[in-house]
Amino acid sequence: MALFKHQVLNSNMQLKTLRAYCFALGSWITNHSNKKVLNISLPQKRRAWMDGLFDNIKNSQLPYKYT
């Protein structure tokens, strides 16, 4: 969680807030054009924030490797 907060969020959110904003979301998986799509139920005002998180994850260059 500490690495996620540091690398992706760049904020000092409490764990309780982080859980409510990022992990306690309604979602479901559908098929679209033979690909799996994750649909997330999210209020309109938080969608831009969540899109920013996904962009941060895509653009992150981690200084360590998993084996």
Image (cartoon, grey):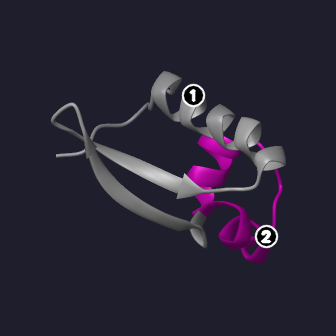
Q: Position of residue 53 (x, y in %)?
A: 63, 39
Query: What residue do we see at 46% from left, 51% from top?
Result: 39
- Examine the rendered structure and indicate whether residue 21 appears above or below residue 55: below
Query: What residue do we see at 75% from left, 77% from top?
Result: 16
Q: Nearer the viewer, residue 36 or 67?
A: 36
Magenta stretch encompasses residue 26: no
Residue 24 falls in which quadrant of the image?
Answer: bottom right
Q: Amino acid at mark 1?
A: Asp
Label 2 element class: helix
- Horizontal side, residue 12 vs residue 55: left or right: right
Label 1 element class: helix
Residue 48 visible to an observer of this rendering: yes
Q: Position of residue 45 (x, y in %)?
A: 84, 46
Q: Nearer the viewer, residue 57 or 24?
A: 24
Quadrant in which the N terminus appears: bottom right
**Distance Cα–Cα, label 2 vs label 1:** 20 Å
- Horizontal side, residue 30 vs residue 50: left or right: left
Magenta part of the chain: 1-22
Q: Nearer the viewer, residue 65 or 33?
A: 33
Magenta stretch encompasses residue 7: yes
Q: Which residue is mark 2?
A: 17
Q: Position of residue 36 (x, y in %)?
A: 25, 44
**Are there few (<14), some (14-19), or many (20+) residues within 10 Å of tag 2?**
few
Residue 61 visible to an observer of this rendering: no
Q: Which residue is mark 1?
A: 55
Query: What residue do we see at 61% from left, 59% from top?
Result: 2
Query: What residue do we see at 79% from left, 70% from top?
Result: 17
- Examine the rendered structure and indicate whether residue 48 appears above or below residue 12: above
Residue 55 falls in which quadrant of the image?
Answer: top right
